[in-house]
Amino acid sequence: MSGVVTGDAVVLGLQPARLPSRALALFLDLLAVWAVYLLITLGLAIATASLDEAAQMAISIASFLLVLVGAPIAVETLSHGRSLGKLACGLRVVRDDGGPIRFRHALVRGAMGVVEILMTFGVVACIASLVSERGRRIGDVFAGTLVVRERVPADRSAVVPPPPPFLVGRFAELDLSAVPDGLWLEIRQYLTRMRQLDPGVGRRLAERLADELVSRTGAPPPQGVPAAAYLAGVVAERQAREARRAFASAGKGTGERAPGFVAPVAEPGRAAPAAAPPVVASDAGGSGAATGFAPPA
């Protein structure tokens, strides 16, 4: 597997898509785009029947550019690299460093796609994809992008380390709704591979990811907490919330209590107290040695 390498020499482990899956995704995209284009062309032909030939030709060219060129660019930009065909095949367009693409990346890919896909019936794109080690076509080379597979078997050895005990429950009030899936993926992949990185490179990458996470949540890490420990604590909080939602859904369907639930006991003449929360185990010293993180000085 040829993994994606970031600018900090970090292997993200994303698997590049090969020609068969890309060809199928492209076929589905072209099928959808041409269907829309034919419907729009038919409607315009009826609506512009009274116009002269030059006006009809101008409208036809404009509709061609807007539907067959502009629409794929807009879809890739708004969906962050997921078109209809790529979504069906489990593919996604990302930057060379594994980050989400922007408008300029989609624009370059779309402009080059007119030449290597539409004008040459995909021959140039197929040859370039076969020659490229990571299956990239010419548009990907110029745009600095890569098509990767999202549906890959999970690596059982890639376990996210738990946060230090002094950070357990520290981010319970943090708003994580604005954090995109792409950033969660980068953070998770960093945490699973941080012990394999050069210390300096790993520290810089952790600081960059922590800055992006702070910009999304609006809450800086606690004073003296390392960036890697901060990332592990926030990821653990997200996993805990997902687990609580899963237990809550299971409890509604079966009527059973979630694991760790302590039933309240009411005293005579008093209302029942609130349920006790589950107990979170941590090491006695609170040193974080088992997690690989050190507490703040």
Image (cartoon, grey):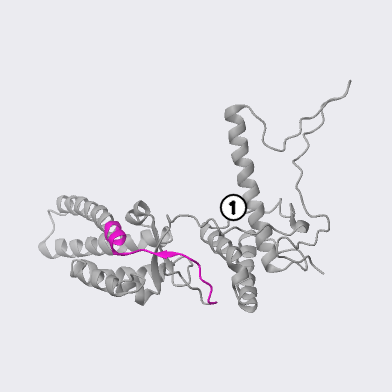
* Relative image position of residue 189 (x, y in whole percent): 55, 63
Q: Is residue 174 left or right of residue 65?
A: right
In the orientation shown, which residue stands out farthest toward the bottom? Answer: 200
Q: Is residue 3 left or right of residue 125?
A: right
Q: Quadrant of residue 197?
A: bottom right
Q: Residue at x 27, y 57 (%)?
A: 24
Whether the magenta-drawn stretch holds residue 12 is answered as: yes
Q: How many marks?
A: 1
Q: Amino acid at mark 1?
A: Ser
* Relative image position of residue 173 (x, y in whole percent): 71, 51
Q: Quadrant of residue 244?
A: top right
Asked which secondary structure carries label 1, the reply is loop
Q: Residue at x 31, y 68 (%)?
A: 110
Q: Nearer the viewer, residue 174 or 190?
A: 190
Residue 280, relative to residue 189: is it above or below?
A: above
Q: Quadrant of the C terminus?
A: bottom right
* Relative image position of residue 144 (x, y in whole percent): 40, 74
Q: Which residue is mark 1?
A: 177
Q: Nearer the viewer, residue 103 or 251?
A: 251
* Relative image position of residue 154 (x, y in whole percent): 49, 55
Q: Residues within 10 Å of mark 1 (few under 14, many from 20)?
A: few
Q: Is residue 205 left or right of residue 276?
A: left
Q: Is residue 14 left or right of residue 272?
A: left
Q: Quadrant of the N terminus?
A: bottom left
Q: Residue at x 66, y 54 (%)?
A: 236
In the orientation shown, which residue stands out farthest toward the left? Answer: 53
Q: Residue at x 37, y 53 (%)?
A: 87
Residues drawn in magenta: 8-25
